Amino acid sequence: MIQSALTAQGSCGLRGVAGLGRTGRSCYRGVAMKVLLIGSGAREHALAEALAASPRCDALYCAPGNPGIASVARCVPVEASNVEGLVELARSLGADLVVVGPEVPLVLGLVDRLVALDIAAFGPSAAAARLEGSKGFTKDLCARAGIPTAAYARFDDEADAMEHLRARGAPIVVKVDGLAAGKGVVVAGELDEAERAVRAAFAEPGAAVVLEDVMTGPELSLFAICDGARATLFGTAMDYKRVGDGDVGPNTGGMGAISPHPLASEALERDLMERFIEPTLAEMRAMGAPFRGVLYLGVMLTPEGPMLLEYNVRFGDPECQALLARFDGDLLALLDGAARGDLDERAVRWRDEASCCVVLAASGYPGKVRAGDVIEGLEDARASHPTVRALHAGTRLDGARLVTAGGRVLSLVATGADVAEASRRAKDAMGRVRVEGAHWRRDVGSIRG
Ligand code: GLY
């Protein structure tokens, strides 16, 4: 059933350095891999392009994918939250590696199911995905491992949380203890705002919250590829979370990103790897839940030093698009090694460039979005500079027309000698795209302190 649902619109094929193996499949030093990628955003489009570029990629499938991903992978209409369907798909394809993009299937245990069937998968087990799935789990881990983070308290009872709030006062941070698609954190300047956030959280059955002290300083994201025991740095990025220029308006999944982070230095990266990533891996191993996959560390650079804001257990979106625009290594070799517990750090190489990713959002985003608006000017945007890449997210083909089908519609990424040049190119390209009612941030690339 699943095989017949394949939309054969392309897949990675023979490469310059690849040779034909006995099976006739392309191979690299005897390795010819069939890869299944999970997800449908611009992050997965960037991952698909990088995986397809690996000399060891013989065939690339994506579930469910999108019209952009279909130019480099065969898209199969199985949703990313359908764990049973994905397991069945991986099995029927004979996938050598499954790369999981979004957090939901990770938290639902997709990797556990695949590994039980002896199918290698890049991404953490459900137990290890608690680093993103439960804020309280992560805060407790930080306390045990001595990882710097704001003082906090956890509550699974609304009345107790309210009592703590009133005793502690504002400002205070209210975090919903579960996946919340970027909407689970309220930095409340006033007590009544904090109370509203707690009340809203406990409107959901079985809810829990973390209340923590407010920190100040610039935010930085660092990515590490982990094989359960070891980790290798996979770059830094700064994202633009709020919907409007100048960082105003509601939080979104991300309206843009630049990489590397302008405040990143080798010393800071080393410090973050040694004092955050490595103790976290050690703690997870000690708990019997070794972390394999990409660990996304969000820190605030406070006057007292870097403090953990959050962990995510997948690549950031749109940070991934910015990171991969600079990546010059073999992503498939890297992710496959990590998934098998044999990290190959030599697979990580970077171009000496900066990158900028600008996100086009549909009318109404991040609220109720309108779908079906025609997307025009994409070819012109792509042609505006050789480094510009257009990565699809909420798009759909309506006959021959490309139309909007989600909140974040597209990412346009460009590279340059520095962030200023990269962002000029990305924004010049975005200026050529026309979608009724759509919006994007003109200040992506400006450095926030
Ligand atoms: N851009 C923020 C995230 O991916 O969580």
Image (tube, grey):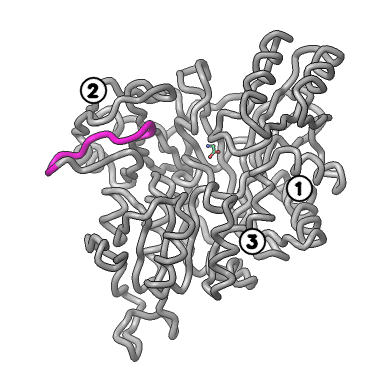
- Residue 384 position, x and y percent, is 25, 39
Q: State which quadrant residue 158 falls in.
A: top right
- Residue 80 position, x and y percent, is 44, 51
Extreme residue in the front direction: 205
Number of dots carrying numbers: 3
Specify which label sits upstream in the sequence, 3 or 1: 1
Which residue shows up at 60% across the image and 72% down it?
340
**Residue type highlighted by circle 2:** Glu
Element at label 3: strand
Extreme residue in the bottom direction: 22
Q: Which residue is mark 1?
A: 276
Specify which label sits upstream in the sequence, 2 or 1: 1
Q: Which residue is mark 3?
A: 292
Element at label 1: helix
Is residue 404 located in the magenta-colored stretch of the structure?
yes
Q: State which quadrant residue 433 falls in.
A: top left
**Residue type highlighted by circle 1:** Phe
Element at label 2: loop
Q: Which residues are magenta?
A: 399-408
- Residue 241 position, x and y percent, is 52, 28
How far apart are labels 2 and 1 at the CA level? Answer: 44 Å
Is residue 328 located in the magenta-colored stretch of the structure?
no
Q: Residues within 10 Å of mark 3 (few under 14, many from 20)?
A: many
The quarter of the image holding the C terminus is top right
Q: Nearer the viewer, mark 3 or mark 1?
A: 3
The quarter of the image holding the N terminus is bottom left
Whether residue 139 appears in this view of the structure is yes
Judged left or right of residue 396, residue 210 is right
Specify which label sits upstream in the sequence, 3 or 2: 3
Which residue shows up at 20% across the image and 39% down it?
402
